[in-house]
Amino acid sequence: MLKIIKSAGKKKSIIAVFTVALLLLFLVSASAYKVMVENNNLKGAYPYKKFESASKCRTCHPGIYEQWSQSMMSQAYTHHWDEIEYFDLAEAHADAVPAIRDVIDGCNGCHTPLAFMNGKFPPARPSEKTMANESVSCEVCHLIQSSTSEPPVNFSYFIEPGMTKFAGRNPSVESPAHKIVVKDIFRTTEFCGNCHNEKNPFGVWVKSTQLEWKEGPYATQGVPCQDCHMPRGHYLNAIMGKPYDDARLHLFHGAHDPGKVRGTVEVRIEPDVREAEPGETVKFTVALFNAKTGHKFPTGSVEDRILWLNVEATDSKGKVYHLNVDKKGFDGEEYTISGDYLAYQDMGIPKKINDFKGVQRDGIPAGNRIFRMPYFDPEGRMTIMQWNTAKLGVDYRIGPRETKTEKFTFRIPANVSPGQMKVTATLNYQLLVKPVADFLNVPEEESAIIVVNDHTTFISILP
Ligand code: HEC
Ligand code: HEC
Ligand code: HEC
Ligand code: HEC
Ligand code: HEC
């Protein structure tokens, strides 16, 4: 190819370079596309009647059923925000842009695998109570035999329906309802990675929880997802069996369990001096230590989540002052400090609003540090539509066992009351950025503020 370019005239070489570039672009986009649809051999492969409902498993596994039914995986298709995003944004986007139809059908490969295999798109709405509502059910996970991809990504599980179920260990008593075959994959993170890693049609890793885990300290120490989301405890697996001391509890608690989120990151704040006069400057340092997650925080639906640090000083008369975080000067930092910006304009496409101006990017007080990774649409605007993400921005999330430090330089105001000043650092979390939740009428609980942690220090203000 090089030889051709060299021997050809200037015009010809430009054409050749252009052709090569086009070919490369085609190859890159074609391979990204292949990843997105790689497990489409299961699309429409089996009708609903080939599968058993979780309510059947419930008759002999009532405890595990109740645990699972309180987790998000039992609601992956029916939960209000999932229904809104799938039908009002993703489906509506595919109606406007038919080329992404296959990608949108793919949502179901993770959120309702039985409906994906049943092959009717979109599946019936949750209110119609079809088997699509099984979401990520017992049957889905316990029919998984292997992963068809390394790393696992985009519903790369291999499933065959039948009376043989797969598990991590042999049962102590025979089951009258099914055969059990042990598969090592149940003890691995690849099992979860089949759905917890996602690459979109632009070739962007829009979800990489299992990959983040793999890079972190828990992989080295052999602590899989199961150890934190399915902890072992004394429990009766099936009514006709005996309790195990190390039964796997099907809690799957995550970002939707405030108790799981609380305390995830530990927060400490200290001043550089303990006494100051009005007009003097005090520098506060906040240390944030991620003690609890096995991946970054936030992970998964990173495009939706917002985690931010708010620091406030209260003087002896109760007057409150908000402190702004000191800039560090890294690339893309503007996305990690809250302010008055409009974003998410691409929601205008599915919502059929011409020249949509967007909604507030952050919806929190200005000048706070945000721990996030922004997602950008093909026009470079921030988006929460992960399938429409052409590029990721700066990754300023907190890694597993990572400690971040933030500084707040505070010039004591002239009118401050002398005496003890209290300074509190609070780390807040929202599942969904509030202005987006409000715009799409997502129920309030999805944008409620969860306090992850806080810490208070004191300084003396001299008269
Ligand atoms: C008629 C009762 C019955 C029904 C219905 C039933 N199971 Fe079981 N299952 C059992 C018994 C008994 C065991 C063995 C429990 C033990 O090891 O103590 C078992 C074990 C298992 C195991 C392996 C656990 C282990 O200890 O190794 C899995 C996985 C499992 N069942 C999944 C399912 C799924 C999925 C369904 C629904 C599609 C289902 N079961 C329906 C009775 C039942
Ligand atoms: C998201 C996937 C997933 C779902 C959904 C799920 N399981 Fe499991 N289940 C697992 C994994 C993984 C293990 C094995 C963990 C191990 O061996 O370390 C397991 C283990 C079990 C066991 C054996 C427990 C033990 O102590 O080893 C039983 C019984 C079981 N599951 C039944 C069910 C039933 C019944 C449901 C539905 C109510 C269900 N599972 C839903 C992933 C799942
Ligand atoms: C068949 C696909 C699939 C598999 C396999 C799977 N998950 Fe999930 N998981 C999902 C989907 C989809 C959701 C999102 C539910 C929702 O819509 O909020 C989810 C949600 C979760 C959540 C809840 C997050 C929250 O916001 O509270 C946790 C925790 C979780 N999964 C852990 C696991 C673990 C651990 C494994 C492996 C043992 C696993 N998952 C395997 C598809 C899967
Ligand atoms: C050391 C414990 C630990 C391990 C290991 C771990 N997690 Fe988590 N995970 C947590 C904690 C704590 C949270 C709650 C804070 C949060 O939302 O990130 C969480 C949250 C989540 C969430 C919700 C995140 C969000 O922001 O919506 C998902 C999904 C999840 N985990 C999946 C996994 C998967 C998949 C693995 C394995 C690849 C895994 N976790 C390994 C502790 C762990
Ligand atoms: C590769 C599997 C996979 C695909 C494909 C996928 N999702 Fe998800 N989705 C997940 C997992 C896993 C989570 C949970 C992550 C977390 O808890 O942070 C999730 C979370 C979500 C949430 C947030 C749930 C909540 O309650 O916070 C919405 C909404 C959602 N997905 C919609 C979609 C739509 C729409 C599509 C298709 C354009 C899609 N998903 C494609 C796996 C997938």
Image (cartoon, helix red, strand yellow):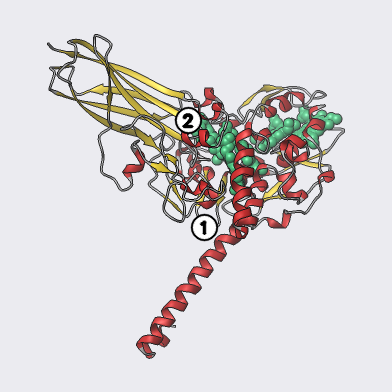
Whichever of callouts 1 and 2 sits on the residue coming sooner in the sequence is: 1
Between 255 and 355, the residue placed more toward the observer is 355
Q: What x and y, as percent, mark residue 302?
A: 49, 41
Above or below — where is 392 with respect to 438? below
In the picture, the quarter occupied by the N terminus is bottom left
Q: Amino acid at mark 2?
A: Gln
Disc 1 secondary structure class:
loop
For residue 395, which numbered disc appears in the image? Answer: none
Disc 2 secondary structure class:
strand
Q: Seen in the image, is 225 located left or right of residue 44?
A: left
Question: Are the residues flagged by discs 1 and 2 in contact, CB closer than 8 Å?
Answer: no
In the picture, the quarter occupied by the C terminus is top left
Q: What x and y, as percent, mark residue 399?
A: 42, 38
Q: Residue furthest front?
A: 354
User: Label 1 crowding class (10 Å Cα cut-off): few <14, some 14-19, many 20+?
Assistant: many
Residue drawn at (49%, 68%) of the image: 25
Residue drawn at (68%, 35%) of the image: 78
One can see residue 193 in this view: no
Residue drawn at (42%, 87%) of the image: 4
Residue drawn at (49%, 35%) of the image: 294
Above or below — where is 171 with respect to 390? above
Q: Which residue is mark 1?
A: 202
Q: Amino acid at mark 1?
A: Phe
Above or below — where is 371 with respect to 357? above
Between 19 and 224, the residue placed more toward the observer is 19
Q: What x and y, as percent, mark residue 245?
A: 67, 23
Between 320 and 303, the residue placed more toward the observer is 320
Q: Which residue is mark 2?
A: 430
Per the model, the C-alpha gap separating discs 1 and 2 is 27 Å
